[in-house]
């Protein structure tokens, strides 16, 4: 651990007011661990935290707290907790770490700094980009038992399974709509707020979804890097090439649960399902 001098003369923790840390001290001095994101106002608390990291020098300078003292410290820290939570300026969300707040604010700004090198997709989190990159590989060990879809990650399969069930845990607070995925609820909420955070850099158009902006951007470009191996067609998006390939293979993975019909595209199945429900287009 790189030492930073603290007000108590030890190393490994620093008062927030004396470092370049983006967090700011309020009424009291806060101590930040330089090995992780832990922050506390209690100097003994940071010392015990540093001992847990393996900084042996603190064992001799400051012995560990007794259970009774630790209980008292927990009670005090709970009273102070709301003072150093990181609050979103655009909604009521609060976070224990600034890094989580930064990630959350991207849901408001639409910023997606993690870009795929193989297609036009971009993500708010690096972990999402890593998961996405595996969609470009052929290995998909997690297979759906109800349709031909397969996935690189078990978490993706779990999310996909919700599309086969009636579970829609993400409910809109302004209308009766509910969704199987949180990101769909976030997108839906913009139909109420009118928010369009995804702005085109080449014209005045703006969109509520990043996917809509990506599709729109392709109207400004003639680049079509995804080429069909069986005919001269080429596409600006990899997903469009996959859909096109079904016209050659005859594959129809989207099957109606109420009749024998099957379709090459999910959008066609959705339209077909309306013929059973009587819902108008």
Image: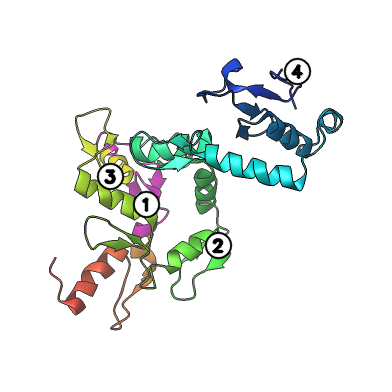
Q: Is residue 278 above or below residue 200?
A: below
> In this figure, which residue is indicated by the disc labeled 1?
183
Name the residue beneath numbered marker 3.
212
Q: Position of residue 238 (x, y in %)?
A: 40, 49
The residue sitting at the bottom extreme is 259
Q: Are the residues flagged by discs 1 and 2 in contact, CB closer than 8 Å?
A: no
Against 29, residue 257 (above or below) is below
- Check residue 188 for magenta coloring: no
Marking on residue 9: 4
CA gap, disc 2 and disc 3:
27 Å
Which dot, 1 or 2, sits closer to the camera? 1
**Which residue is at a point 49% across and 36% down the rendered structure image?**
85
In front here: 108 or 144?
Answer: 108
User: How would you rate the neighbour count of disc 3 (Cα within 10 Å): few for under 14, some for 14-19, many for 20 or more?
Assistant: few
Question: Which residue position is annotated with label 2?
Answer: 154
- Sequence-wise, which precedes: disc 2 or disc 3? 2
Instruction: Please tell me whether mark 1 sits on a helix, a strand or a loop.
Output: helix
In the rendered image, the quadrant that contains the C terminus is bottom left
Q: Earlier in the sequence, mark 3 or mark 4?
A: 4
Question: What residue range appears in magenta?
Answer: 217-244
């Amino acid at each position: 651990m790189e030492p930073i001098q603290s007000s108590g003369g030890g190393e490994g923790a620093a008062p927030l007011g004396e470092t370049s840390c983006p967090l700011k001290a309020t009424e009291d001095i806060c101590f930040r661990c330089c090995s992780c994101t832990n922050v506390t106002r209690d100097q003994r608390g940071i010392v015990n935290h540093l001992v847990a990291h393996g900084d042996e020098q603190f064992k001799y300078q400051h012995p560990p707290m007794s259970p009774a003292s630790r209980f008292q410290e927990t009670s005090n820290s709970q009273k102070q907790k709301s003072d150093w939570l990181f609050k979103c300026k655009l909604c009521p969300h609060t976070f224990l770490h600034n890094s989580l707040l930064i990630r959350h604010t991207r849901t408001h700004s639409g910023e997606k700094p993690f870009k795929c090198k193989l297609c036009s997709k971009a993500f708010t989190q690096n972990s999402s980009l890593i998961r996405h990159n595996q969609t470009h590989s052929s290995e998909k060990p997690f297979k759906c038992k109800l349709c031909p879809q397969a996935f690189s990650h078990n978490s993706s399969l779990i999310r996909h399974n919700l599309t086969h069930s009636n579970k829609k845990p993400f409910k809109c607070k302004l209308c009766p709509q509910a969704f199987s995925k949180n990101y769909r609820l976030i997108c839906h909420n913009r139909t109420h707020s009118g928010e369009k955070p995804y702005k085109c850099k080449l014209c005045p158009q703006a969109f509520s979804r990043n996917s809509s902006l990506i599709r729109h951007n392709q109207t400004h470009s003639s680049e079509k890097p995804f080429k069909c191996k069986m005919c001269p067609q080429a596409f600006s998006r990899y997903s469009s090439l996959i859909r096109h390939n079904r016209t050659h293979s005859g594959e129809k993975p989207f099957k109606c649960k109420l009749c024998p019909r099957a379709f090459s595209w999910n959008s066609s199945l959705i339209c077909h399902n309306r013929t059973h429900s009587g819902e108008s287009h």
